[in-house]
Image (cartoon, rainbow, N blue to C red):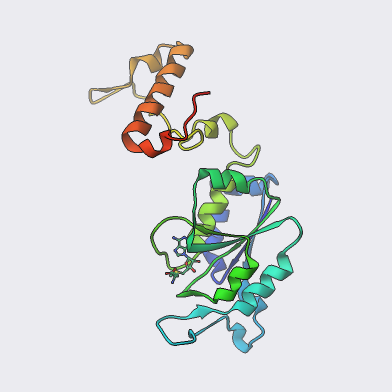
């Protein structure tokens, strides 16, 4: 998969791309991630990409021309163009999974007050990462890229993400590591029993219990395998 991220602040991605699982996925050829400064698509002097809003009002607005020129330059028949936007579909694991089916994602990061409305005509989907406002689309672009990349075959162990929260409309079960007794807080006996069938049953029951307590809304779409 290839992911192109259009941003005015490419340096924000330096740490994100050079650590841990994302770095390994890039090095192993599982994903190609390009961070592109759309200032280079500006036709104005000094690479200007924003201006004041027509009709007045606070803040600067990203101009449509450089963003649309960038999309047109990068887009192929296999591309899905995503606009990061607090007014878009609220992101979740199912959307992340659906995005893995595309060969090429182009993610547009807004900034400042937002962008010229006409940009929307050139995008396929608008994604919000929650009902709050960030200064720009860079953190949403990282959230989308990270959550999609970890689902690409061979990036992490499949068993690990199949039991992650939200995969089957359940939250994950509680996990423990050594020591077995920390200040009197003991690891549930079943986990040290070596009985794999019992452990499996315990974990599934804990997933259902947790989901009932914390996210009963998810259970509406949960189906026992
Ligand atoms: C300050 S926000 C603009 C908010 C816009 N004026 C509004 O109220 O809908 C600047 C940019 O950050 C990104 N952004 C901010 N919050 C976001 C969120 N919750 N999800 C996705 N993108 C977000 C978008 O790209 C947005 O254009």
Q: Eyeballing the image, is 131 above or below 151? A: below
The image quarter in which residue 185 lies:
top left
Residue 176 seen anywhere in this rendered image of the structure: no
Tell me how many marks there are: 0
Residue 209 seen anywhere in this rendered image of the structure: yes
Q: 186 left or right of 82?
A: left
Instruction: Determine the residue located farthest toward the front in the rendered image.
Output: 220
Residue 106 image point, x, y percent = 64, 60
| Residue at (49, 51) in percent of width and height | 91
The image quarter in which residue 179 lies:
top left
Q: Eyeballing the image, is 107 above or below 159? A: below
Q: 70 left or right of 204?
A: right
Foreground residue among 29 and 79: 79
| Residue at (56, 72) in percent of width and height | 8
The image quarter in which residue 107 lies:
bottom right
Residue 63 image point, x, y percent = 57, 79
Foreground residue among 24 and 37: 37
Q: Eyeballing the image, is 175 above or below 140? A: above
Residue 20 image point, x, y percent = 54, 46
Q: 178 left or right of 148?
A: left
Residue 72 image point, x, y percent = 71, 70
Foreground residue among 39 and 59: 59
| Residue at (47, 31) in percent of width and height | 222
| Residue at (43, 32) in percent of width and height | 172
């Amino acid at each position: 998969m290839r992911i192109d991220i259009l941003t005015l602040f490419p340096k924000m991605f330096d740490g994100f791309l050079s650590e841990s699982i994302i770095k390994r996925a890039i090095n192993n050829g599982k994903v190609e991630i390009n961070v592109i400064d759309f200032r280079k698509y500006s036709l104005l002097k000094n690479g200007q990409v924003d201006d004041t809003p027509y009709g007045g009002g606070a803040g600067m607005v990203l101009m449509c021309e450089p963003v649309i020129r960038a999309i047109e330059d990068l887009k192929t028949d296999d591309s899905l163009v995503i606009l990061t936007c607090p007014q878009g579909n609220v992101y979740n694991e199912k959307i992340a999974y659906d995005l893995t089916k595309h060969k090429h994602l182009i993610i547009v990061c807004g900034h400042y007050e937002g962008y010229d409305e006409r940009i929307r005509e050139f995008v396929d989907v608008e994604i919000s990462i929650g009902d709050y406002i960030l200064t720009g689309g860079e953190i949403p672009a990282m959230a989308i890229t990270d959550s999609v990349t970890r689902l690409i075959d061979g990036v992490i162990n499949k068993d690990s993400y199949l039991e992650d929260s939200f995969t089957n409309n359940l939250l994950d079960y509680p996990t423990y590591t050594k020591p077995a007794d920390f200040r009197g807080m003991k690891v549930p006996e079943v986990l040290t029993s070596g009985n794999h069938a019992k452990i499996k049953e315990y974990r599934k029951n804990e997933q259902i219990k947790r989901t009932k307590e914390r996210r009963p809304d998810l259970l509406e779409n949960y189906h026992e395998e």
